[in-house]
Amino acid sequence: MKFDLPLAKAPDSIWTAIEASLTEPRSSGSGHPYLPRRLPRRPLWIAALAAAASLATAIFIWYRTPRPAWEVVRLDGSPSIASKPMAAVAKIGVGQWLQTDASSRARISVGNIGTVEIAPNTRVEVVAARPDQQRLKLARGEISASVSAPPRLFFVDTPAGAAVDLGCAYTMKADPDGNGLLRVTLGWVSLEWEGRESLVPAGASCRTRQKTGPGTPYFDDASPRLRNALADFDFNGGGDPALAIILAEARIRDTLTLWHLLSRVDPTAREGVYNRMVDLVPLPNGVEKDRALQLDPSTLKHWREELAWKW
Amino acid sequence: MVAGPGRCDITADIIESCRRGDRDAFRALYDAYKDKVYSIALYFFHGDEAAASDTTQQVFLKLLRGVAQFRNDAEFSTWLYRLVVNACLDGARRAKPRGLSSSAFAMDAVAVPHSQEQDLMRQQTARSVRAALSALPVKFRLPILLRYFEDLSYSEMATAMNCSMGTVASRLNRGHKMLAQMLESLR
């Protein structure tokens, strides 16, 4: 059935209201509401004096103004910021560490884009707090992030990869050895490390290992055999025996895992992964076997988007 | 199944100019998307023109205030429609449930001129589709409108609606089936 919904024309009054909300129209100068009003001309020495005073004021303000900082709320126990116990509500700036012990928790408001809850026994550092990049480093422990922002604005660095927010909620764990686990509860997260990328949707998880980076994502309801075999394959050199278990255990939904494996297995094993994927979900229009096996990026992307109907 | 009006093309230059506070660039961006944003809101709010206007205004104000945070490596439309989704959901939470607005019938005037009989049939069909859309639960209505008016991909819709692509897919699928059932008599 083809719908026939006419595109409605937005009334002119909307733009008028937007303009009115933004700024009062200027009565002089260029008339452009976003441009500064032109100042009347003054003698040069007054201008020079004013410039010097402005510079001094700017320097003073720069020294006195605190650097961008996020608000932190103590939830339990006595978390510390920069090695000092924090008050019930405090600020944390770039370069400062927040640490919780076994009985403390805290919540950080990341600018105006979301919150990050810091679990017990966790150590995090604010790496960047700019409008174009908000970045935390998770040295160890566990955080739960809930972010509402344009994709690729919020990052969590771990020793074995960076979690890149694509609009989502997730938990990220890192153990003292630098190994980690990402579990996504809403939206998508991209886990990235040295050119290796795992795309993890809601309901799925992905392990990370130091010096190896992100493993292959899997749905949390995948069979234990599949998950164990995947850990073997990703991090313990499980090779063909592990791959055989993964392929045998895979359900339709596990094409998430197989899609990632396609570009990670040995080239001689690639066709086996491809065949299993096609067994589970017929090849969609626009995806050709040869191009898929050659790992053509646009083919793989299109295939992933079609497979995602089943995820 | 879905044949919408197609995608808008906004260049990185326009977005960059918006970030610098260029009003003309923002006007160009507004002009490119205003009818689609307004249409989604209008159909979402059962033809309520006042609610659609409010939502459109809110979306573009948020867009203007947040555009400095937007980076060109992400899809602009994904972010824009996320704002639309949030504004629609906020509006729906605030508003009491209501039926099809009488002003919804004003939308018939948008239809392309045809013969009188064709016009009547088109108006009847459009009215039925709108009524069926209005009857859909919000979670099924939104993805259908996003797919129809902007042809977003599943991953873009997933980001806009803050859910997984699988959820988008199943909601689209179920929404279309529900619509098809409701519109069975028009076939």
Image (tube, coloured by chain):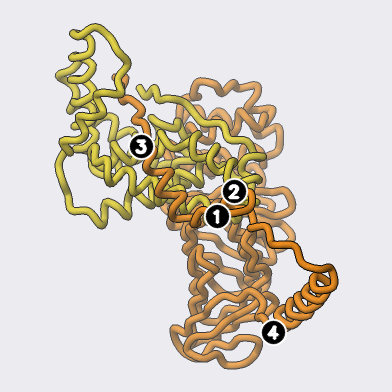
Q: From the viewer's side, name the closer residue of B40 and B1.
A: B40
Please name which of the two marks, 3 or 4, marks the residue nearer to the observer.
3
Q: Amino acid under label 3?
A: Pro
Using the image, name the chain to which the residue with label 1 belongs.
Answer: A
In this structure image, what is the colour of chain A?
Answer: orange
Chain that is yellow in the image: B
Q: What element does badge 1 sit on?
A: loop
Per the image, the residue denoted by label 1 is: A26
Q: Position of residue A242 (x, y in %)?
A: 60, 47
How far, Cα to Cα, is label 4 from label 1?
33 Å
How far, Cα to Cα, is label 1 from label 2?
8 Å
Per the image, the residue denoted by label 3 is: A11
Please name which of the two marks, 2 or 3, marks the residue nearer to the observer.
2
Please name which of the two marks, 1 or 2, marks the residue nearer to the observer.
1
Per the image, the residue denoted by label 4 is: A64
Question: Which numbered disc flags the more N-terminal residue, 1 or 2?
Answer: 1
Question: Which numbered disc flags the more N-terminal residue, 1 or 3?
Answer: 3
Q: Position of residue A212 (x, y in %)?
A: 71, 57
Question: Which numbered disc flags the more N-terminal residue, 2 or 3?
Answer: 3
Question: Mark 4 near mark 1, Cβ–Cβ under 8 Å?
Answer: no
